[in-house]
Amino acid sequence: MKRDNLIRKLVEVVGATHVLTGEDAMSPHLVDWRGRYRGSAICVVQPGSTAEISAVVATCALHGVAIVPQGGNTGLCGAATPNPDGGAVVVGLARVNRIRSIDPANNTMTVEAGCLLHDVRAAAAAAQRLFPLSLAAEGSCQIGGNLSTNAGGVQVLRYGNARELTLGLEVVLPSGEVWDGLRGLRKNNTGYDLKQLFIGAEGTLGIITAAVLKLFPLPSATATAWLAVASPSAAVILLGHLQDRFGAALTACELISETALHIVRRHVRTGSELPASPWHLLIELSSGDDATAMHEALTSFLAAASDDGRVDDAVLAQSSEQARALWALRENIGEAERREGPSIKHDVSLPISLVPEFIALADQALGAAFPDLRSVTFGHIGDGNLHYNQSKVDAADNAAFLTARPQVNRIVHDLAHRLGGSISAEHGIGQLKRDELPRYKQPLELDLMRAIKRTIDPRGLMNPGKLL
Ligand code: FAD
């Protein structure tokens, strides 16, 4: 009865076509991208404006019903999947997708939460500006989801993560009130920076409905190269030399193990001829300088690095198509892993200097505990962020291996923590790492987080069971 009454009220707010109740219609919204979590919900509501989101949230609050905000549903921690109890309403943001304005002189754009990241980037480019957040899921993920997970991606090295790219927010609070913080200011010291609470909050404090984003000059020159390196230590040393030589023009620096490259070739692409090597780096330079000069500078840097053995081999992209093909190898690792089958995944960050030590110690400890193990290691080494994923060499042994997830996580997360790292670099906590968090956060940090949650969402209606 309560359920029927709620659905009737939600239909009054958004119209019957935007309230999904049937199993088939709701199904894609009840499972996460990796297929690890499946939940249940009263309904999936798809409001079309901030006013409608506000009314939806107020209606749910009146009925004491929990809300799960959902963007593109590409998150990797089960944070956008409702709990199995079926007591929540999923609020899908896809229809709230207008680019509200672009201010090239202020280098800002104001966009609604449901805009696809790809569309945000394209709109910025059409105004001769760069919005630098870039990740392999950008054709499906939404900017509201990016901000709620504080997404990173491949250009953090140069431009920072989602948090650093956001100047203002509009948020529907758990009461249904709308906080209009859509300011395009680079300086504003008027007390607590409230927007930062909602960025990275994984939908546990409110629904982000719009944002003011920072824009940058569109680079006129880009150079992309694939480098074969002997080891993670060689990669870190080379990263330092690249930064010394090219400064802020070094936009991306990605580490890829041969194992990761191998599975991409097997499942997704085989095109590019690349040097055989246990480790690879994909680097990108970009700037407003002359393209020919940039290519020449990188060519001579790589020649010197090859001569003195810092690089074993290198492929410098000669065209934008070739650059895209090299990037496709990196961007398809996640998809290739999905096709390869289940594995135990980690998204850790470390001081960059300690990445080689982490890989060596973690490989050693896991190898001793679990024979015939395969680690797919890759990530944004320029940010000290590794994706470090384990499965058995023989896929037939995987089902048994997956039951050892707690022991595997313990080895990897304890080691990252001991080396001063984090158990979640860019994917968040969600339900995947919620129970790990108390082991690694200080009790005082957790108390402060809970106090913030209680203040903004005293009834615990926003995305329950995630993060805290
Ligand atoms: P969802 O998955 O829908 O939601 C994620 C979280 O945000 C949930 O807690 C949800 O409740 C909340 N949420 C969504 N929208 C809102 C809103 N408007 N207001 C409040 N809360 C909201 N991540 C990286 O950081 N770097 C990468 O390089 C990267 N690469 C990826 C590659 C692939 C192939 C895939 C599948 C994922 C990758 N991800 C990466 C993870 C994922 O794409 C990001 O976490 C992304 O930011 C999630 O956006 P989304 O719109 O899909 O959010």
Image (cartoon, rainbow, N blue to C red):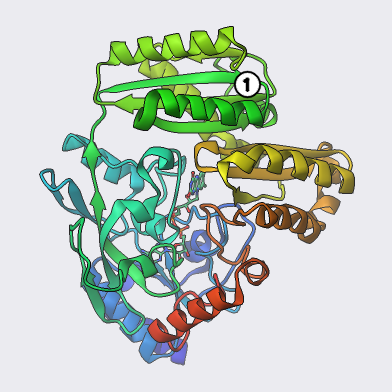
User: Is residue 328 something that shows in the picture?
Assistant: no
Drawn side of residue 66 relative to residue 432, left or right: left
As rendered, which of 89 and 412 lies closer to the eye?
A: 412
Q: Residue at x 24, y 77 (%)?
A: 178
* Residue 167 against residue 320 in the figure, above or below: below
Which quarter of the figure has residue 417?
bottom right
Instruction: Where is residue 85? Give x, y as percent.
Output: 60, 79
Which quarter of the figure has residue 15?
bottom left
Drawn side of residue 257 relative to residue 466, left or right: right
* Residue 265 against residue 332 in the figure, above or below: above
Instruction: Where is residue 444? Give x, y as percent.
Output: 56, 77
**Amino acid at the residue labelled 1:** Val
Drawn side of residue 5 relative to residue 306, left or right: left
User: Is residue 303 something that shows in the picture?
Assistant: yes
Which residue is the site of mark 1? 229
Identify the residue at the far left of this view: 105
Instruction: Where is residue 281? Give x, y as percent.
Output: 56, 26
